[in-house]
Image (cartoon, rainbow, N blue to C red):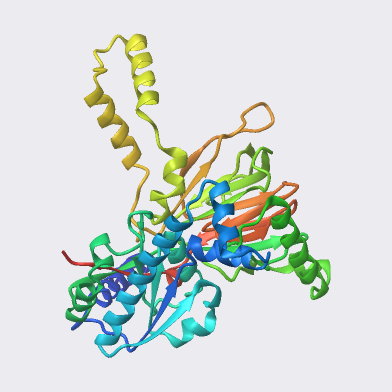
Amino acid sequence: MLSYGNSVNRLRLFQKTLRNIASQPDGGFKPAKVAVVTKTTRYEFEQQRYRYAGLSEEDLKQLLAMKGSSYSGLLERHNIHTRSVQHIVESLQSEGIEVRVVKRGEYDEEVVRWADTIISAGGDGTMLLVASKVFSKDKPVVGVNTDPERSEGHLCLPVRYTYAFTEALKKLCRGEFRWLWRQRIRLHLEGTGINPTPVDLHEQQMSLEEHNQAHRITTMDGQRGAGTLNDSLSKPNLLPVRSLNEIFIGESLSSRASYYEISVDDGPWEKQKSSGLSICTGTGSKAWSYNINKLVEQAVADVLKIGKSQTGLDIPLNHAFIEKVTEEYNQSLVFSPEERRLFFSIREPIVNRVFSSSRQRGFANKVCVRSRCWDACMVVDGGTSFEFNDGAIATISMSEEDQLRTLLLEN
C-alpha cells in the first residue's frame, strides 16, 4: 500500500510529465490574431512632450541640440524601429494572420483579450510592459528587438530575426521551437494605510515630486472608496500585476536609507536598514539583480591577494585566473527563468547593534516585508509603482498559474 507521501510524489511527477508534454509544439503554432505592441521611440516622446508647449520643429531641433541630443539621430532610430515594425506586420499578414498594431499607451486588457498572441516590438522595457497585462498561461508573448544597435533585448528573439522575422514565423509554423515558461512573481499587500492602486511609470518621465504627487492622488482616490480600517487589515490584497524581472522596495529618495523588516520563508523577522531590497526571478537574475551582486576583477584580485598573504598558499594572481574566478562567481548569480524560486538582495545593508543582516542575499520561496519607511514605493519591473509606507506588509511569492508562455526558436 502506497503511503500518502509516495502518492503525492507520484502525482507531482505525473503532473510534471504532462507539463513537459504540453510544452512541446505539436505540428507547429500559427495564431489567427496577433497584436503587435510597439514602443514609443525617443523621437516620438520628444515630439509629444514639446508639442503641447507650442514649439515648432525648428525650436525642437535647437532644444535637443542644447541638451546634447541630435534631432536627425533620433529621427534615424525612429525610422529603423518603424521599418522593423512594418516588416513584422507584413510577415504576419503574408501568412494570413490578422494583425492589430497598438502603441504602448493604447495597450490594455481589451487588446489582450482580442489577441491569440502578442508581439512586443521594441526592447526589454516594452516586453515587460506587454507581459504585465497578460495573466493567462495560454497567451504566448513574443519579443522582437526593433533596434538591436541601441537595445540589448535579452527577453527578445535573437537579433537576426529582427531582420528576418519571416524566417522566425516559418519556424513557428513548422514547430521548430519550444515553449519557455517564465516564472513570475505575485504580490499580496496588507496592513494600515495601503492603497493597491498602481502608478504606471511606463509612459511617464516623472520627477520625484511628480511621482510622489501621483501616489498622493491615487491614495486619496483609494480612501474615498475604502471602508473602515478593519477592511484594509482584514485580508491581503492580490495586486493586479505580475513581475517578470524583479520587485524593488525602497525610499523614493535614493539617498535616504530604507527602514523595513524582512522574513524569509516564514523565518524570524529581521530589522533592516539599507539602500533597498531587490527580489528577482530567474528571468531577472540577468538584469538589475546581477548588476547589484556581481564582482569586478579588481575586487577579486584584492581578495585573492589578502587570502594569499594570510594563508601562505600559492594562489595564482595572474589575469587569467582572476578573470576565471570572477566569471565563475558572477555566473553563479544567474538561474533559469523556469525555476520556481526567488532571489533576494539587500542592497548595501547597514549593520550595527540595532540592525542585523544574517543573509545579504539568497534564494527563497517566499519573502515578507513590513515597511517602516516614510516615503517609499514598491516598483514592479521598473514600470509600475505602489505606495509602500509604514505599516504596509508585502508577501512576495510565486504560483504555477502565473507563468508566462514565451518561446525559444530551435537553431
Residue 120 vertical placement versus 375 (above, below):
below
Is residue 200 visible to the viewer in this orientation of the structure? Answer: no
Residue 75 vertical placement versus 326 (above, below):
below
Picture coordinates of residue 381, whole percent (x, y)? 51, 58
Quadrant hosting residue 189: bottom right
Quadrant hosting residue 11: bottom left
Q: Is 138 left or right of 353, judged from the image as shown?
A: left
Q: Is 225 left or right of 348, judged from the image as shown?
A: right
Quadrant hosting residue 253: top right
Picture coordinates of residue 218, whole percent (x, y)? 74, 67
Residue drawn at the location 54% of the way across and 78% of the way down: 108
Is residue 125 visible to the viewer in this orientation of the structure? Answer: yes
Query: Considering depth in this image, is 349 or 148 the residue closer to the camera?
Result: 148
Number of marks drawn = 0
Query: Considering depth in this image, is 390 or 229 the residue closer to the camera?
Result: 390
Residue 346 vertical placement versus 395 (above, below):
above
Image quadrant for the C terminus?
bottom left
Residue 307 vertical placement versus 332 (above, below):
above
Residue drawn at the location 18% of the way across and 67% of the way down: 410
Query: Considering depth in this image, is 357 or 92 the residue closer to the camera?
Result: 92
Residue drawn at the location 61% of the way across and 63% of the way down: 49
Picture coordinates of residue 286, whole percent (x, y)? 38, 49
Picture coordinates of residue 367, whole percent (x, y)? 55, 52
Image quadrant for the N terminus?
bottom left
